[in-house]
Image: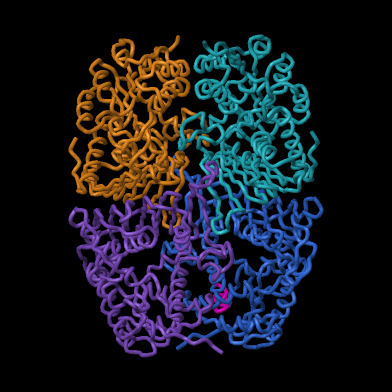
Chain colours: A purple, B blue, C orange, D cyan
Amino acid sequence: MPKPSIAIGMVGYKFMGKAHSNAYRQINQFFDLPLRTRLKTIVGRDANKVAAMAERWGWETSTDDWRRVIDDPEIRIVDICSPNNTHYEVALAALDAGKIVACEKPLAMNGAQAREMAAAARGKINTVWFNYRRVPAIAFARQLIDEGRIGRIFHFRALYLQDWTLDPSVPLLWRMDKDVAGSGVTGDLHSHIVDLSNYLAGEITAVAGTSRIFVNERSRPEGGASKVEIEDASIFVAKYADGAIGHFEATRFANGRKNGNTFEINGEHGSLYFDLEDMSRLWYFDSREPKHIQGWRKISVWEEMHPYMKQWWVPGCAIGYEHTFGNQAADLIAAVAADRPMKPDFDDGLRCQLVLDAVLEACESDRWVTVVKQ
Amino acid sequence: MPKPSIAIGMVGYKFMGKAHSNAYRQINQFFDLPLRTRLKTIVGRDANKVAAMAERWGWETSTDDWRRVIDDPEIRIVDICSPNNTHYEVALAALDAGKIVACEKPLAMNGAQAREMAAAARGKINTVWFNYRRVPAIAFARQLIDEGRIGRIFHFRALYLQDWTLDPSVPLLWRMDKDVAGSGVTGDLHSHIVDLSNYLAGEITAVAGTSRIFVNERSRPEGGASKVEIEDASIFVAKYADGAIGHFEATRFANGRKNGNTFEINGEHGSLYFDLEDMSRLWYFDSREPKHIQGWRKISVWEEMHPYMKQWWVPGCAIGYEHTFGNQAADLIAAVAADRPMKPDFDDGLRCQLVLDAVLEACESDRWVTVVKQ
Amino acid sequence: MPKPSIAIGMVGYKFMGKAHSNAYRQINQFFDLPLRTRLKTIVGRDANKVAAMAERWGWETSTDDWRRVIDDPEIRIVDICSPNNTHYEVALAALDAGKIVACEKPLAMNGAQAREMAAAARGKINTVWFNYRRVPAIAFARQLIDEGRIGRIFHFRALYLQDWTLDPSVPLLWRMDKDVAGSGVTGDLHSHIVDLSNYLAGEITAVAGTSRIFVNERSRPEGGASKVEIEDASIFVAKYADGAIGHFEATRFANGRKNGNTFEINGEHGSLYFDLEDMSRLWYFDSREPKHIQGWRKISVWEEMHPYMKQWWVPGCAIGYEHTFGNQAADLIAAVAADRPMKPDFDDGLRCQLVLDAVLEACESDRWVTVVKQ
Amino acid sequence: MPKPSIAIGMVGYKFMGKAHSNAYRQINQFFDLPLRTRLKTIVGRDANKVAAMAERWGWETSTDDWRRVIDDPEIRIVDICSPNNTHYEVALAALDAGKIVACEKPLAMNGAQAREMAAAARGKINTVWFNYRRVPAIAFARQLIDEGRIGRIFHFRALYLQDWTLDPSVPLLWRMDKDVAGSGVTGDLHSHIVDLSNYLAGEITAVAGTSRIFVNERSRPEGGASKVEIEDASIFVAKYADGAIGHFEATRFANGRKNGNTFEINGEHGSLYFDLEDMSRLWYFDSREPKHIQGWRKISVWEEMHPYMKQWWVPGCAIGYEHTFGNQAADLIAAVAADRPMKPDFDDGLRCQLVLDAVLEACESDRWVTVVKQ
């Protein structure tokens, strides 16, 4: 007897569309889920391109009208991976139609939108694609904290370093277009590391920082040139509710860093270090061991008992970037099947957005800014 | 108009069956191939288990009789990923039936079998699953050598270190059963690094070495216990036709090493270093640069122009173990579509097997053994 | 014919006294200097202890009265390595007496003192013991920048992470006593990384940050307990005159980090990375190479042509912490012999102090603070 | 009251002469020894050069006649750091004169010489400069083994990789002259790693291997050219008395490796890894920890309780190459003062030499060779 299926409609079909499609496909083989995903409808602005995408990735139908997904009573999950400025409208419509919504990060263009969206989503199953929480090594970091191995946290420091816009000839893509992206590295990169801080280190209460636009004008893909209005780099210092202090840097001008998302947590009993460029590893220092054998241990997070790893291959076989989406998609389907809440949810998206709002304001005003309460 | 498809029959359905199934599925989305793979028939000894596998992975039919695959005129590719002692019979039958054969490593139980198989395969498209040649960093190593960046090679050294049988309570699985596996780490692990040496460093002419069985008796999964007859560890020194010298170590008793396949090549103009536990990286030393800035450079092999990487995600996004199979499967399908030879082929399998035969004899006899000419 | 000698008087005899004594002794053997150092007088508050130190390290005489060094016409160099609150008085007296002064960092308790000291020193040979400028890898970083390999700098980020006061039972040593040290990690650790920023990355114009005292009361070595008034940790964001932005963190609460002084510079043509815990290495990324072989290269800075290395051993032989002092001492003696200026000098000490003052004020006031012009 | 002194006479004054001189000088300051070293006489073939060396390094007298050291009743320690072919004669004479002898490695030109020397030395205090036993991380490895943290050893593997003779224009220095050096990398580099194996891993009983001369002719420093008769590279496989197996490689043709002395020990409870190019670290894997937090821990061997480190600086401050000699010199002086045996001694030198003899014969004959019993 074949498994029952759950129909998905997806708004967006480019890079994240590929990542999500792959995830929804692979989990049927790799995870033991009560429901089988059915890739029903994919939506994109360019009808021909989205049709090709549907053909390639096995979506049953494609359309250039996102409302067809909302209106389709068969579709239970609406996945939103279109550019940032579309999240608000599509998510609210989907929630209103009773859909389960899985929305890409950042949840919204700003805290005000995010607050409305979180309110609309509350009490329903929903999720934000902060996929790095599902890097096995990061889920494992959370586990070690839960096991009491770090204790009181003194410091969190996180970098997200890239270099792909350093070349001034890179055109002004949508991620650099203020109207579409809302902000630069703040929404794109800080969103990830602020969410990791929320997940692992606690509540940020105030921030001060500064940002820069290093290349002031760029050509547009469609021709012509525009003034760049979003920040290429942003650094901020943060105070936490429990007394910890931290700092965050996001930049696309760190020559030689491609996906340099690193963080370190220093606590009273130990420390953790992670680098997304070496994503199978979590470094752990335990200061309660005998002093002479203390050291940073390089844990390869690919054993059977490590989060998610049993589903994929065998110990010693690395998984990659794409599997973080599979892990999250599998958790979502399991949550839907069990009718239980899923994390991170829109409230986590809001929580992150309120920090980002404070960061943007702090950088703009050269002042310390208190993060608005959720 | 949908693409034409090519039907595959697969003999074997366990760990490698999963790896190959996943590869044949994913490449339809990630690669631009003229043919679409059709997962037609999967074969296994346990009819129920192989049926479940078929259901999960999208194989159209399953059977416990491998001859049904040979006899099916629709099936063009026969994939063999059953235990070592089955390769010979299945491959010869498939070749005889005009199939394209893709066989797991080691190609055969010994050089004599391999020689027959290679003879039968010659002139046809065929391949051996030495999948590590398709680790992007390793394919890239080959490219750097082709670019003349290493020059004359003085040394090749390779380790394949694991620790999974160190615990004496691990039962005698098929990989430790002499009748099924033929040998221990020699066929399982040395086969990989000897193939990499063949691929990257040239022809081995003579070997001397030693091997050990550290645990002499193990329980059997089906009950009872048996004397262990295959080697847990094997080390050998090698002479190359062009004057280079090297050494190879394969063991399942290297505590803390899980998939520790590392190699280093030292040449007159530079050196290369690779570690499968950090598979996105190739380390390269160039001695023709200005002396003061010489250093081992850590190249993250995930840029668009690196082998295979453009097909998967974007720069900075790691792929994993499974993608090496996808890369090889895609190359196979492309070769079939273009009716051109595919590498590594059965002759490469034979070439490797003849070295392994020499290694086994050298360890047995405590003598230097000349590798039999292909 | 023996070399002429130059007499040194040293105020301070504890940890830095040992480091400087060793440096003044070793350079006579390892460097080819026109003058031989003569360790004439060492000064300490405890007459017995300083006498033992003199006996052990070959100082001709010892005293508990630092004015004897000032008054000794034979002594040409006065080395000050006593606690921070003594630098001002001793240095001014020594300068007034026409001595060459080599003063430990931080130069002074604050910018006002440092300004007076720098004014008094101007036009004379003098130096501040920012010894990390003489780590060969760091001097080499400066060389690579001078060679134009980095280009316009976008980012500087530096950490100085330690963990030795994390344990609340560590008593309130002089480095934690506000009256003696002036500040906590700001004067002790930020001073080093701010100087490196001055040396390598340019002028800091404004800062915002925050600091913490994590342990509020500590026992005193002499008995009793005191409120802790100096900061255990401090983080700040910085703006540079040329548009770069950076951040700095100094802490003694980073569990597992012992001497974790790391910095990274990202520029338009390349990047540099250094970690004092692995001080023989400088990592260099060059974005003007062919794209496919770009990578961070790990340069072991121990070749003959690397700064200072020819004086010590042979390529491949690491030097350590102590040799940074030897390098600086040798440069000082050479400068004196040639009657030429020495760097870093009191003006560099002042420049650093003015940033530290701004950092302390910024953390105190929760405001961005403009660094006072030199 | 000043300490009593102990007079040293040293035969040899070049690179090792510098290393030993520095060691004998520094330990008076850094260690708490009952005797103060007195650098009395240094011997070299070139009277002018050795006189300059004496002047620079504080030796009281110099001479070109090594017998003056033997005949001087004040001299208690004779240090031999002249080329290999002189060790035998000088050591026997010194032992005969009742001196304490400290001889550089390899102890002798061959096992026969070494056997005589060991016999003559037995019962007296003496040592061989296998200085790497005094790298703190290696002494610490021995300690961890003694603590039972590794258990039964399965594997030892060691490399000593250099690249300084790869360039054919490097002339035939004494280390490449068969008459003076006896052998190439076998005596120079294998001697170190074989001694480490003896120290850490147990008794080698048989070896098989191969060696190469890659550059057949070299110019001589004094003019003209000669055929090269010593091996540039040598690899061998080893069997141990207790059942372990291992391999060893020594080469001067490993492009990019400068002082690449690495070893790994795999045992039933854990593993150890060391790299001389990063000599402050010992990597330790413990398989008895909870499985999910197992990992290779990077222990920085610079804490107060680590071997020798308390004598030098403070935690986090690296020492370097030269300090290994200081550690051994200090142990020697302490042994002399206490009239107790010192290790490694001439019997260790012999033990090493017998393995080297077997390696040379094995490479020469292409056979397995049994190591002669001590």
Q: Nearer the viewer, residue D196 or B135?
A: D196
- Asked if residue D253 lies in the magenta stretch, the reply is no
For the question of whether residue B301 can be seen, the reply is: no
Q: Which residues are magenta?
A: B331-338
Q: Nearer the viewer, residue D282 or A374?
A: A374
Instruction: State whether residue B275 is above or below residue D158.
Output: below
Residue D248 on image: x %, y %: 67, 44
Image quadrant where one finds the N terminus of chain C: top left
Q: Give the quadrant of residue A199.
A: bottom left
Most common SS among magenta residues: helix
In this picture, residue D236 sits left or right of residue A334: right
Q: Give the quadrant of residue D109.
A: top right
Instruction: State whether residue B247 is above or below residue D61.
Output: below
In this picture, residue D197 sits left or right of residue A13: right
What residue lies at 61% left-to-right and 46% top-to-bottom? D272
What residue lies at 39% left-to-right and 22% top-to-bottom? C13
For the question of whether residue B4 can be seen, the reply is: yes
- Asked if residue B337 lies in the magenta stretch, the reply is yes
In this picture, residue A236 sits left or right of residue B269: left
Image quadrant where one finds the C terminus of chain C: top left
Q: Nearer the viewer, residue B317 or A85?
A: A85
Residue A32 on image: x %, y %: 53, 77
Residue A239 on image: x %, y %: 29, 53
